[in-house]
Amino acid sequence: MLPQLPFDMNDPRNMGRPIHWDENLHARAIIQMIQADEIQEALRMLENPPAWYRENYPAEFTAIKNKLYQRLYSQIEYASDQEEVDMAQRHDVAVSQWNGEYCFPRAQIITDAVKKANDNGMAPFIVDLGCSHGNLPLGLKAAGLRFNYLGLAMNQKVIESLRTAVGNDIWSDWPSEGQEAWLVCTEVLEHCMDPHSLVIDAYKPGLHYAQMFWSVPYGCLGGGLENWDRRLGHVRGWTRKEFSEFVDKHFPGYQQTLYMAHSMVLHGVKI
Amino acid sequence: MILQEFDRQDRINVGRPNYFSVDDWLNLVSQYISADEVEKALWLLDNPPSWFTDHYPVRAKELRDRLFKQFFTTVDYAKDPVSTAQIGACDGDVPRGQIVVDYCKALNDQNIIPHVVECAPGNYWLAGLLERSGVKFTYYAETIDQDLQRRAQEKLSDFWSKEPGQHSIFVAFEFIEHISDTFQIYQSFLKNCPNARAVFLSTPRHCWGGGMANWSENALGHLRTYSPRQFHQFAIKYWPEFRWTLHDGHVMCLVGEK
């Protein structure tokens, strides 16, 4: 007995339609990509079904795509995030995050580097790209370390709040004569639909960075999302190779050390 | 083809192309930037012949550094100063604005008060134009500059509203050419105005004002240019069910109606 065809082959509308294509499986796979923090991949899958489906685009896919765009945290939402503004005023929480699991292992790596610099009589000028609510500067300040700091973010209210919290003796728009500039960009890449924009943000100040610290979750953070009907911030996972190659491609000439944990940290020292 | 001068006996030059002129390459990159094609210029800078990837010319690095310095980033947009006095102001005739005014007036004639939702409103000139034109409307806009958003909401409070109203329209003027992720326009539509009956988009036709004589002294906001066909393709990609009309000019305005 021949297997039953899933649709009427004699209907001219089904000309070119793939027989062995399970629409439900395709939709499930897309949802699983979203749940695995791979939004960019899910969007690619949504935009690239077999040709017949590109012309006869399933309503279910339109619904998934629209829901995905609605849930995806936009630049304006990042810029107006009141939770981040509130967090920037809770210094104790920021410091506690820096010293705890939340910022492991990047906090230890960066703190050790600053301590080493201080021991050698140097206070670095740290440019923090995507500074969030400031656990880095507040954590380093609480540890009594010497450094200067410039936080960059879309949320200007957070920047204003952080600038006050960090203080004018630490906050600076430019390194002083002979001061080493360091770049920090932690837990930002995975939020960027266009990672190249971060490269431009890093180069825009016109500084030459003696050291850099990047971090990104290794693959999917915390196993991913059980329910993706919520705010979506992470747009892709990164492998070790992708992460290392991205930094090396856009910032050549650094000796890289990669630290592996649930969050990968890449420490680059200018050769 | 001009044979480039370098020591072909030097082992460092193994694999170096004979006819690739770095000057021509960098001049071309500069021309792309001047022609409002910053994305393409960056691609060219990132993709020289492979020998130059390993031996990246100092002049190329200097040009790229200069380009990055002039690039208007999202953080720059988030704090671009617009004075409160400038909110709602409009210099001269803006044809795309008049298209929206005419559309809204036609609705007013049917006793319909349109709800205008604007993405990336600039100095909110459209709201000011609608008000001065005597249009009855409600208005909501979002911008990445939150301080400007707050001041605009206060100044335009007479018609500021998030309620969708009877008949919503979505406007995204002169935005697409500034952003690397163009889906953001559709995302703003979905988040703020998913039931809009009409969509108004605009972008310069090809290169605005012929481009820039001296890009290295200007803030670079435009990332790419659009032909009418490419602009239309963007519109139908995200709003395939809308009927699109192109109002052509130095600035192309696409009006999509459901």
Image: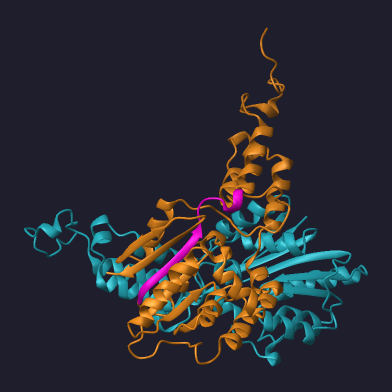
Chain colours: A orange, B cyan
Is residue A216 shown in magenta?
yes
Residue at 85% from the left image edge and 83% from the top image edge: B158
**x and y percentages locating residue A200 in the rendered image:** 45, 71
In this picture, is B2 found above or below A136? above
The residue closer to the viewer here, A225 or B56, is: A225
Range of magenta residues = A209-223
Residue at 44% from the left image edge and 85% from the top image edge: A146
Q: Is residue B106 left or right of residue A29?
A: right
Q: Position of residue B83 (x, y in %)?
A: 66, 90
Which residue is nearer to you in this view: A58 or B127? A58
Main secondary structure along the magenta-highlighted residues:
strand
Q: Is residue B44 visible?
A: no
Is B63 a magenta residue?
no
x and y, in percent, of residue B73 in the image: 52, 74
Side of B97 where A199 appears, left or right = left
Residue B221 in sight: yes
Q: Identify the image quadrant of residue A113.
A: bottom left
Count the marks.
Answer: 0
* Outermost residue toward the right in this view: B111
Expressed as whole percent of the image width and height from the top left, the position of residue A205 reads 43, 80
Task: Locate the C terminus of chain A by quadrant.
Answer: bottom left
Based on the displayed image, in which of its 4 quarters is residue A269 positioned?
bottom left
Find the residue positioned furthest to the top. A1
Looking at the picture, tell me which residue is in the foreground, A133 or A41. Answer: A133
| Position above or below: B243 against B95 | above
Q: Is residue B229 left or right of residue A244?
A: right
Q: Quadrant of the N terminus of chain A?
A: top right
Look at 92% across and 67% down and name the residue there: B110
The reply, left or right, for residue A260 in relation to residue A221 is: left
* Vertical arrangement, residue B165 with respect to residue B13, above or below: below
Q: Residue furthest left?
A: B9
